[in-house]
Image (cartoon, rainbow, N blue to C red):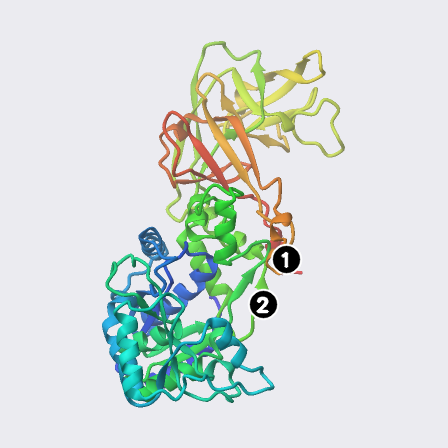
Amino acid sequence: MTEEKGLNFIEEIVEEDLKEKKYLQIITRFPPEPNGYLHIGHASSICLNFGLTQKYGGYTNLRFDDTNPVTEETEYVESIKNDVKWLGFEWGNELYASDYFDTLYEYAIKLIKKGLAYVDDSTSEEIAALKGTPTEPGKNSPYRNRSVEENLDLFERMKNGEFADGSKTLRAKIDMAHTNMLMRDPVLYRIKHAHHHRTGDKWCIYPMYDFAHGQSDSIETVTHSICTLEFVPHRELYDWLIEKLEIYPSKQYEFARRNLTYTITSKRKLLQLVNDKYVDGWDDPRMTTISGLRRRGFTPESIRDFCDRIGVAKRENIVDIGLLEHCLREHLNKVALRRMVVLDPVKLVITNYPAGQTEEVYSENNPEAENNGGTRAIPFSNELWIEREDFMEVPAKKWFRLAPGAMVRLKSAYIIKCEDFAKDENGNITEIMCTYIPESKSGNDTSGIHVKGTIHWVSIRHAAKAEVRLYDRLFKVENPAAEEDDFLSYINPNSLKVIKTAYIEPSLKTAQPGAQFQFIRKGYFTLDKYSTPENLVFNRSVTLKDTWAKESKK
């Protein structure tokens, strides 16, 4: 019986709110900006927001924060929807901040009429210069005391497109001496003559994040607006705007983001990797984007498990990427089909097995599967491919694989004994000659011979060829994000090794893209999404060795 996991601090807040009957149902939202692909950091937020409403009832909105037309694309919208669905969640409503542009404009008018917002002609540099410092108060803009009528006129003209980008902004009128720098007359609207992916050319003024976010939450009656810690200073403005506009009082809560070793999650840096061709697109299996993890062979279950294990906290820390890999191994061990694939082949000939004869041997699909997994037939003949590393001309101490005179078992087949081998002029092993013990067949072994080593193989006559891509970590250092100016110099030059000709057992020829397998003794692999029947490509999802599990038990 497993120990029940305690509540995280946000669950404690929700339970207390429900106990006090503060809300009839819990409503959360996941509000990505459609300016890039989601990454592993977003997965934590997705699991938290959707997980809360799954646990306590209610629903989660998927709301796209599309207030910056310059960086947003429909491609990103579709990828985000696919990722959320793939992780196993369904949203209550698909919404966009742009749905509320008319309402937000009316909210701005309301603030102006209440004397709480004004049009400023200052440049961004002038605004910054007047902001002051954390220890020194700012100075009022020379345009701060415009009349309500003048501000209403100018703001309407801003909307009508009479002014150039950057020439005017709408600012809240709060307090230029406020201890919270964000409360020193923050910008609410800016001018951007840019085509919007949904509203087209209707608007040339767009709300800033701080103005759109809390008001969108309020419009949707979001009960718990969950953000990461960098939004703690924004909460005061969030509450101020809701109070002054006299709208539904959504509440903001913050949790700590989890950074992952050997990775970056900055959208700007991820975009740089894509644009500069360090990776093969947003879904490159070395990327920490959800689409990249999916293509590499990560499962929704493993990512949800990872997010659950790292938990929800109030303090940021760095999580070992080994934990993510451990979660994947645990899941794939239960669901991945076992198959035999030879990555670095050398020919093995069984000299006393009839040439041209084929028989079927049977091997388990997955001995760890809950439903027993069943078995599959594998063709066996006298000429096989085995791994080059499974033969040693001069065996080391405690070597239990093939060597001159040594015996091993061929997985699910027979015990063989190495009788001889051949080399080329460069000293490379080209062929290994063995004999087999007919009475030693797996499942019906009457030979009485016991061997310590078992190796995998593929029948040469029946094997198919495939390309195998061995992926490793994209960065050589634990925290590449800390190298702000030179993170690219820490890219691992060995993050991808391509094996052009691997030999696979015939059952893999009908594999479907995304299907997951354990290549016996080699790791977990998935068929690449761009693979074709004529060109099979398998990506290594994760190795078999789990160093994280061992380290975590010390």
- Check the image and report above or below for 282 versus 146: above
**Residue that appears at 59% across and 64% down:** 318
Mark 2 lies on residue: 317
- Check the image and report above or below for 399 versus 96: above
Pick the residue in front: 77 or 320: 77
**Residue that appears at 60% across and 49% down:** 488
Q: Earlier in the sequence, mark 2 or mark 1?
A: 2
Residue 538: x percent and y percent?
A: 46, 35
- Check the image and report above or below for 4 versus 304: below
Q: Amino acid at mark 2?
A: Asn
Residue 344: x percent and y percent?
A: 58, 26
Classify 10 Å Cα crowding around label 2: few (below 14), some (14-19), many (20 and above): few
Task: Quadrant for residue 49, please give it.
Answer: bottom left
**Residue that appears at 51% across and 67% down:** 257
Classify 10 Å Cα crowding around label 1: few (below 14), some (14-19), many (20 and above): few
- Check the image and report above or below for 411 versus 37: above
Q: Amino acid at mark 1?
A: Glu
Please, what secondary structure does the residue beneath circle 2 have?
A: strand
Mark in front: 2 vs 1: 1
Pick the residue in front: 14 or 433: 14
Whether residue 448 is visible to the viewer of this picture, yes or no, is no
Please, what secondary structure does the residue beneath circle 1 have?
A: loop
Q: Which mark is on residue 85?
A: none
C-alpha gap between disc 2 and disc 1: 17 Å
Q: Which mark is on residue 483?
A: 1
